[in-house]
């Protein structure tokens, strides 16, 4: 029996007047995301040592509580041993940046991903310093990618990043710099220091004049959606996807919209109520920043500024923007960890969609607004496992 905590979740929904369920995938979005791009990147990443599709798990033990027909949960906890979908984005973007830079340094010489993977450019890579800001998971992927290629790596974290996540970043050979303030402050400090030192930023958020690495990061995520399309027994009617800066949401929306066309599912973005930049941007009709400490247990979603590259896809394709409080996050983690049908390791940010779905099941009016009923087939993105093992153990072993 699921805990009654879901009855008390603070939940707000904004119905996006711009999105039109049943609309065709806009040609203007095709150059950023399409199935051809996703399959090409999947082919490249599938050659990486340790690649394997992550599981798509049925949560049919929770369908009655949610009042829906099926729930599928994409479990990213085994991804490359990094325990997060972000392993697909940051490391892929590091490779693409290195290939572009090596081409400049070796004019007239054919440069290839195969040679990069084989270590042919180690001397070049040793002189290319990679930098990024992170809440934990993106930085881990960037640090792992840099370590694989022999690049120095500088990772900036903000005051709220846990010690466990800091230690994990350092374990990949990165120099970790903690700055005062929130995630957005760490992004700004990274950009400033990289400019002064000649480093190369691999960020998962875009800003004016900075496009290529965040494009590669987002496109890397479509390996996950390509796997999902193969694994699903039937197309989903609804997809709940975490917010953050919007990169994951844009990748999921853009790729699945291209695959399913006018029969696309409804897309619902879920954010913490303390870090709801996408929700607020949708209401304003343009990107807006959310200020403050952005503190939330959902550490990977503690973002106050929208990726300008992701925003056009997010604005066009998101049917509903939804914000939740933190209260039920620990219980959802425990519910997945203690399932009779098979335990699932889910981190704090991974359960945002599940909490939103179960909370909607307790509020019939809101549920109806999202066209959720017993025929609905739900896709949830289980974006991370225990990326801070100590914190995960503390939460899941609690008596709640």
Image: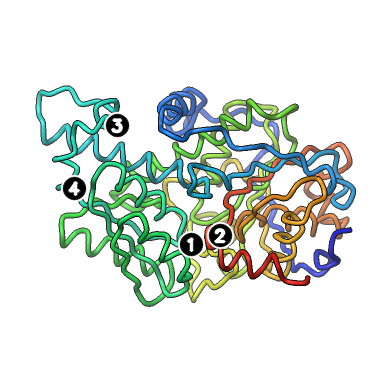
Mark 1 or 3, closer to the camera = 3
Separation of disc 1 and disc 4 at Cα? Answer: 34 Å
Which residue, given by chain and number where applicable, does mark 2 sit on? Answer: 284
Q: Residue 77 location, x and y as percent?
A: 58, 48
Tags 4 and 2 touching, CB below 8 Å: no
Reading the image, the residue beneath label 3 is: 117
Q: Callout 1: 10 Å neighbours few (<14), some, many (20+)?
A: some
Side (left or right) of 1 relative to 227: right
| Mark earlier in primary sequence (1, 4) | 4
- x and y percentages locating residue 189 in the rendered image: 29, 67
Instruction: Classify residue 7 as left or right of residue 100.
Output: right
Mark 2 surroundings: few (<14), some (14-19) or many (≥20) residues within 10 A: few
User: Are discs 4 and 3 less than 8 Å apart at CB?
Assistant: no
Q: CA distance from mark 4 to mark 2?
A: 40 Å
Classify mark 4: helix, strand or loop: loop
Q: Nearer the viewer, mark 1 or mark 4?
A: 4
Point out the image quarter for the C terminus. Answer: bottom right
| Above or below, comparing residue 255 to residue 305 in the picture | above
């Amino acid at each position: 029996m699921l805990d009654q905590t879901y009855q008390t979740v603070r939940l707000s929904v904004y119905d996006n007047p711009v999105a039109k369920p049943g609309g065709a995938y806009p040609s203007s979005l095709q150059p950023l995301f399409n199935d051809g791009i996703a399959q090409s990147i999947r082919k490249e990443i599938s050659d990486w040592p340790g690649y394997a599709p992550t599981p798509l798990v049925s949560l049919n033990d929770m369908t009655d509580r949610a009042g829906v027909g099926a729930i599928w949960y994409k479990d990213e906890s085994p991804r490359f041993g990094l325990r997060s979908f972000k392993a697909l984005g940051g490391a892929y973007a590091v490779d693409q940046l290195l290939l572009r830079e090596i081409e400049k340094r070796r004019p007239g010489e054919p440069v290839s991903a195969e040679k990069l993977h084989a270590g042919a450019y180690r001397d070049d890579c040793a002189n290319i310093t990679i930098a990024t800001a992170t809440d934990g998971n993106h930085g881990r992927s960037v640090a792992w990618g840099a370590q694989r290629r022999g690049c120095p790596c500088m990772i900036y974290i903000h005051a709220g990043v846990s010690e466990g996540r800091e230690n994990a970043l350092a374990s990949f050979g990165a120099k970790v710099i903690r700055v005062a303030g929130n995630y957005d402050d760490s992004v700004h400090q990274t950009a400033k220091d990289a400019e002064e030192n000649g480093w190369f930023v691999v960020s998962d958020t875009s800003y004016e004049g900075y496009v290529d690495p965040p494009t590669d990061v987002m496109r890397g995520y479509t390996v996950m959606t390509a796997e999902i399309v193969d694994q699903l027994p039937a197309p989903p009617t609804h997809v709940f996807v975490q917010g953050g800066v919007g990169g994951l949401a844009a990748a999921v929306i853009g790729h699945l919209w291209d695959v399913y066309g006018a029969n696309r599912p409804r897309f619902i973005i879920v954010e913490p109520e303390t870090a709801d930049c996408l929700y607020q941007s949708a209401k304003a009709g343009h990107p807006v920043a959310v200020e403050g400490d952005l503190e939330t247990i959902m550490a990977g979603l503690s973002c106050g500024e929208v990726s300008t590259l992701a925003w056009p896809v997010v604005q066009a394709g998101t049917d509903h923007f939804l914000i939740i409080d933190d209260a039920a996050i620990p219980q959802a983690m425990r519910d997945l960890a203690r399932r009779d049908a098979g335990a699932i390791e889910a981190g704090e940010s991974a359960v945002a969609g599940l909490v939103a779905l179960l909370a909607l099941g307790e509020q019939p009016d809101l549920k109806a607004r999202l066209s959720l009923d017993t025929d609905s087939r739900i896709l949830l993105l289980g974006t991370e496992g225990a990326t801070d093992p100590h914190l995960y153990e503390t939460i899941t072993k609690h008596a709640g």
